[in-house]
């Protein structure tokens, strides 16, 4: 008799290889390496099944706020679980969904008085674009059917969200099944010959021209406010968002702020729109809404939008959209508990202080020969690696410099996931200065190891 002894890791790895298909992952590469399998989390660290600890240097893809396994958040879910795990929001309500709606309206930019729940950033975006479309339809402006987006925008992976997305590597293959959108340039200062001022001017000039000629065909402009995330953490020049909002308002085009990545303190304000006192017509939140615990998203709308749907039933102005888990009580309960911790622990004030600490630490890296640009807003950081610093020549994508650097960071004890040649550093908002310092040390060492080929800094 042959007894094959496998460890739990080997058993799980084999099943993972046999049956799991991972998101945004070339499975051929993935299956050729030993998978990382997480067992538990504590504070800002995650632990794998082999007992190794890693800093969560990207907040589990930009979600986590208060760390992992937080007793207050766990308790909120347990308490709600003792009452009911789920009941529908189709035609009825539940306590946490009601209380969270009130709370969201209180903290959101002014004018956003209505909350429509869903379960991911992408569905929240779908809702915003369908609401914008039907808003004009219900008001009789039936020609206003198209959208404006920005170059390299990312709004999620469902078909509507991809239609207002503009990242060729992800989106081009699906182009034949998408609705067309107008794309204006995103002001990418580092990659614009004229720097920030000219990049800003180019964006605003094209937007102005588009609105002056086509506003009667355009329902809304969708934007990732202040920081465009998935394109590489690209920070807008100051004033850009405010000016875009003013132009939309002047030309009667709705403004949709996709705060899925930037919301809930990430940029040093509750919402990135707050940084320029912008009140959008529609705002999408997700990711950090539940502190990174459960899949809840929300689309906030103004009274003006809501009222365009508010009519006698036979007028057919109802918003026919919903998801099975819309307004899930467990998710809403943990979101409420997370927002309570924001107040009690003064999370936003903390982010501002920590952001300057991080900025100072990262400044020491500016002279490294392959660090082209360090971009930061709050605790949302992207470090663009370049082959040649003088000419800003990028690394060829097949070199996978970002992937290699992130793999090295993992070996050194920190998890992150790159965006092309941009290294992402998005630590949980509760990270202490000591933890931030350790993570930046790992970041620096992995960048130097991979780009300069040395083992020591
Ligand atoms: C992550 C993200 C989304 C999509 O959210 P999911 O929950 O992954 O569907 C949409 N917009 C922005 C700006 C994001 O960063």
Image (cartoon, helix red, strand yellow):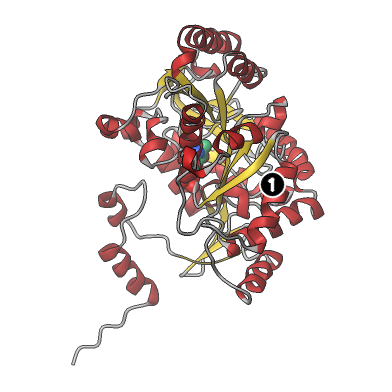
Residue 45 sits in which quadrant? bottom right
> Can residue 448 be seen in this snapshot?
no
Does residue 7 appear anywhere in the picture? yes
Of the 4 image quadrants, the one containing the C terminus is: top right
Where 82 falls versus 457 (above or below)?
A: below
Q: Quadrant of residue 247?
A: top right
Residue found at x 53% / y 7%: 205
Where does the image place residue 17, in percent across and percent down from the top left?
A: 28, 63
Would you identify the image quadrant in which residue 21 lies? bottom left
**Image position, residue 443 (x, y; %):** 56, 42
> Residue beneath label 1, please?
104
Q: Is residue 326 left or right of residue 431?
A: left
Please tell me which residue is depicted at 62% across the width and 45% down the height of the picture: 115
> 403 or 88: which is nearer to us?
88
- Helix or strand or loop: what does disc 1 sit on? helix
At x 53%, y 18%, the residue is: 187
Q: Position of residue 12 (x, y in %)?
A: 35, 71
- Locate residue 264, reporting x and y percent: 66, 44
- Which quadrant, please, contains the N terminus? bottom left
Point 47% across, 10% down: residue: 210
Q: Is residue 90 above or below residue 259?
A: below
Extreme-left residue of the structure: 1
Q: Front-most of 366 and 397?
A: 397
**In the depicted view, which residue is nearer to us: 342 or 59?**
342
Give 403 or 275, whichever is nearer the viewer.
Answer: 275
């Amino acid at each position: 008799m042959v007894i094959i002894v496998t460890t739990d890791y080997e058993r799980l790895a084999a099943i993972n290889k046999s049956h799991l298909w991972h998101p945004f992952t070339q499975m051929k590469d993935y299956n050729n390496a030993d998978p990382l399998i997480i067992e538990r989390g504590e504070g800002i660290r995650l632990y794998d099944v082999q007992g190794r600890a890693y800093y969560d240097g990207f907040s589990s893809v930009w979600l986590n706020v208060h760390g992992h396994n937080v007793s207050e958040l766990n308790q909120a879910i347990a308490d709600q679980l003792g009452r009911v795990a789920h009941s529908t929001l189709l035609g009825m309500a539940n306590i946490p969904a009601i209380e969270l709606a009130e709370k969201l309206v209180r903290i959101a930019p002014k004018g956003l008085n209505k909350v429509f729940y869903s379960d991911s950033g992408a569905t929240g975006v779908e809702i915003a674009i369908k609401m914008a479309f039907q808003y004009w339809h219900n008001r009789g402006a039936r020609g206003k059917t198209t959208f404006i987006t920005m170059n390299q925008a990312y709004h999620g992976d469902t078909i509507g969200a991809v239609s207002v997305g503009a990242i060729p590597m992800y989106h081009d293959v699906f182009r034949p099944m998408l609705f067309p959108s107008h794309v204006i340039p995103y002001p990418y200062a580092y990659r614009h010959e004229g720097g920030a001022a000219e990049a800003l001017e180019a964006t605003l000039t094209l937007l102005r021209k588009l609105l002056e000629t086509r506003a009667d065909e355009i329902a809304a402009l969708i934007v990732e406010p202040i920081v465009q995330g998935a394109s590489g953490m690209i920070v807008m020049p100051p004033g850009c968002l405010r000016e875009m909002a003013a132009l939309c308002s002047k030309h009667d085009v709705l403004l949709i702020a996709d705060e899925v990545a930037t919301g809930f303190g990430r940029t040093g304000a509750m919402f990135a729109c707050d940084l320029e006192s912008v009140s959008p017509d529609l705002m999408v939140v997700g990711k950090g809404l539940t502190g990174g615990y459960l899949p809840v998203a929300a689309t906030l709308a103004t009274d003006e939008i809501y009222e365009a749907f508010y009519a006698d039933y036979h007028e057919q102005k109802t918003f026919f959209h919903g998801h099975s888990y819309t307004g899930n009580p467990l998710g809403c309960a943990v979101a409420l508990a997370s927002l309570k911790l924001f107040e009690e622990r003064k999370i936003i004030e903390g982010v501002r202080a920590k952001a300057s600490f991080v900025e100072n630490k990262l400044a020491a890296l500016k002279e490294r020969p392959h660090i082209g640009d360090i971009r930061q807003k709050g605790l949302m950081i992207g470090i663009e690696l370049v082959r040649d610093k003088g000419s800003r020549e990028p690394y060829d994508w097949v070199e996978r410099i970002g992937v290699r650097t992130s793999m090295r960071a993992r070996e050194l004890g920190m998890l992150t996931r790159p965006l092309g040649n941009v290294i992402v550093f998005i630590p949980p908002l509760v990270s202490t200065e000591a933890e931030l310092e350790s993570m930046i040390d790992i970041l620096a060492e992995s960048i130097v190891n991979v780009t300069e080929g040395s083992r020591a800094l």
